Image (tube, rainbow, N blue to C red):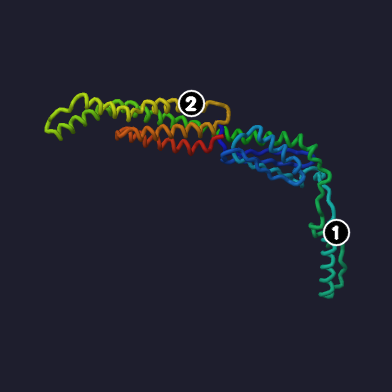
Amino acid sequence: MLSMTGYGRAEAQIEGRKWMIEIKSLNHRYVEIITRLPNVLSSLEVDIKKRVGERIFRGRIEISIQADVESGPDNGVQYGLNVPLLRNYHSLLVRIKEELNLKEEIELRTLVRFKEIFIPSETRFDPAVAWGGLQKTLDEAIDALIRMRRVEGEALKKDFLERLDTLTRHLGSAKARAPRTVLEYKQRLQERIRELTDGLEMDPVRLSQEVALLAEKSDVTEEIVRFESHIAQMEKLLQSPEAIGRKLDFLLQEMGREVNTLGSKSNDISIGQDVIELKSELAKLREQAQNVE
């Protein structure tokens, strides 16, 4: 069981540069992969998304790849000259000289202080050649991300199982209470009739019909059996190595329908309290399910 939130990072020396890959994942209903790449890697965007999508199946995945251009023996980079900017700097210096009537000459060492006139060139970098090393580094970042997602997933799994125990306890309470509600209704009905008729007894056949009608309307056996089945399915699902987030969403929706019907059928106060607790735990489970891959 994996959480949808996590972070992974990996570094490698590739093609004379030090590359850093960071992957961050956040909650999302489906899978969405966002990349932030340097221009030299734009041709690899599809390959990067495909590789990530083969291992991560739900969440908003943000991938950032950066190169340290100061790394490597020759930085892996060549530089060109921004001639228009150089001419502009020179003309400004000439103007300053004229305005202030300065006699010093404009020297080369003055111009080279303007670092903006030197432009890094990417012509020596071949992304197709670098892709082999980048794949390995990307896999390492994904591995780190999945490890974090798995740790958080185990915590979510523990919370799910504890809440399922709570659901089972309250459902068991309602199940045990349900048969007694009909008997108590029969007793209340008899007492009420005696009060209204000065102690006269109600026709036993008529009384049985009334009790049977209530028993049919308030029978929650079917809802309880289905709810128990959903709990068993969820416990089994939590042991699955697959992505289970969407299946959890579906099961929780079904459990919500059953507990709503259970609450509407029963007029018993004790069962009503169990229904409130069941709804409360289901709301917490639905919130937690939004974090599961």
Spatial CA distance of label 1 from label 2 is 70 Å
Q: Residue 184, percent across and down?
A: 24, 29
Question: Badge 1 local density, few (<14 within 10 Å), some, or many (20+)?
Answer: few
Q: Which residue is mark 2?
A: 233
Q: Residue 19, percent across and down?
A: 73, 41
Helix, strand or loop at mark 1: helix
Which amino acid is tagged 2? Answer: Gln
Question: Badge 2 local density, few (<14 within 10 Å), some, or many (20+)?
Answer: few
In the image, is 91 to the left or to the right of 264?
A: right
- Residue placed at 43% from the left, 34% from the top? 257
- Residue placed at 60% from the left, 41% from the top? 60
> Is 11 in front, or is 163?
163
Is residue 159 among the parts visible in the rendering? no
In the image, is 188 to the left or to the right of 13?
A: left
Which numbered marker is on residue 83? Answer: 1
**Quadrant into which the N terminus falls:** top right
> Is 96 in front, or is 250?
250
In the image, is 16 to the left or to the right of 288?
A: right
Task: Please say if 74 is above or below 229.
Answer: below
Q: Residue 150, percent across and down?
A: 57, 32
Quarter of the figure with residue 136: top right
Which numbered marker is on residue 49? Answer: none
